[in-house]
Image (tube, helix red, strand yellow):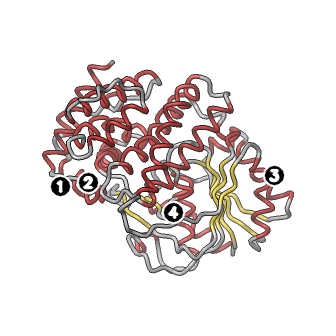
Amino acid sequence: MYTDKRVYSYFYPMMIGRGCVASLGEKVKEQGCERTIVLYDKPLKELGIVDRVLSSLKASNVQYVGWDGVQTDPSADSVNRAAEIARSEGVDGIVAIGGGSAIDTGKAVDVLIHNPGRAEDWFEVKDVKPGVPSFMVSTTSGTASEVTVLAVISDADGKKRLMFPNAAAPRMAVLDPELTLGLPPALTSSTGMDAFSHAAESFTCNLANPLTDRMALDAIRLVAQWLPTAARDGGNLDAREGMQMAQLIAGLSFNNASTHAGHAIAHALGKARHVPHGVGCAFAVGEVLEFFAPDVPKKVREIGLLMGADIPENAAPEEIGRLTRETINAFKKKIHVPTVAERGVTKEQLALLGDDFMLEGGKKYTLREMTASAYIALATTALDNEAADQ
């Protein structure tokens, strides 16, 4: 019997499976959309992925206007430019193709379709008018932005801000593993560790519940099983499919629980040093779990075991944390996750980021109250361990 009496629920339209993007046009048409804006970046167009989506829209006689200005870590300015085109073209649907940056751009544009002003006017505002039907086509296996309720957008100072599309507007997640076959090894490994960090942090946050826990553990199991193969052999469709499922389940888990300290560190590094999100999430996730092992030793032990750690039955919480961290860091090395040191991050820089770590919302969901000095110590330890593991 579970003693947790909180109420929690899930509902999200999805289309999942090999080749399912061919049916996207039909789904767009079913929602009454006649003219959509299609958001993507130039590299996806060059890979031919965008053309597969456009072909499906054409086959269902859905008109579209394309916009290839999606930025990595989208800025408010880029969102405003896309929204201006969407408004002027009178679109009644949004299709976003890519990873978290494209999909967050799509969700932010959805906020601005029927709400006046600029993106900056709607940061952290939840009471917004519904937008238009939107369709989020994922081409990576990490962010799970296609099934989360918010968009992360950078303000003029580079700080990560949140926008909240109205849940009344229909949205569909499209996960076709064939679209991830061209993902380079480094991006495969780093985005895959983003999915892992979503699951691990969701499992160890103070909002975790029985359902989010089960999804988090299944996502971790899938990452351990499929990410090494996906990173080594990008054409292995079974591995790509496994990682898309891992991303999806991890996203559903943290969307209804939360991420915490690891993501606070990743976001601060993204702002200060332009560290890619997946690399930043992978950077300290092992150290974060070691830090919180005394609070939830059984949970950290479960993560460690799923990742292949050999943890004695009578291990103390500190040993559980250490063995889990060592196993995760060895896993990162095995799959060649890029390091933050490669992005020029130093201890001296980390020492200046205490306030940035504390600004992140994830600190509210840790099992222990965090301080700037605790964050700096965590990040510094992670940097030391990263160097030792190379």
Question: Residue under circle 2?
Answer: 366
Q: Residue at x 27, y 22 (%)?
A: 387
Query: In the displayed structure, does residue 278 sit left or right of residue 13?
Result: left
Residue 170 position, x and y percent, is 64, 71
Q: Dividing the picture into quarters, in which one does residue 378 lie?
A: top left
Residue 382 position, x and y percent, is 25, 32
Front label number (3 vs 4): 3
Q: Amino acid at mark 2?
A: Thr
- Identify the mark at residue 55; answer none if there is no mark: 3
Q: Nearer the viewer, residue 358 or 159?
A: 358
Front label number (4 vs 2): 2
Q: Secondary structure at mark 4?
A: helix
Q: Amino acid at mark 1?
A: Glu
Q: Secondary structure at mark 1?
A: loop
Q: Dividing the picture into quarters, in which one does residue 49 lie?
A: top right
- Identify the mark at residue 231; answer none if there is no mark: none
Q: Dividing the picture into quarters, in which one does residue 196 lie?
A: top left
Direction front: furthest residue: 1
- Identify the mark at residue 79; answer none if there is no mark: 4
Quadrant where the C terminus sits is top left
Q: Residues within 10 Å of mark 4 (few under 14, many from 20)?
A: many
CA distance separating discs 3 and 2? 45 Å
Q: Residue at x 57, y 78 (%)?
A: 130
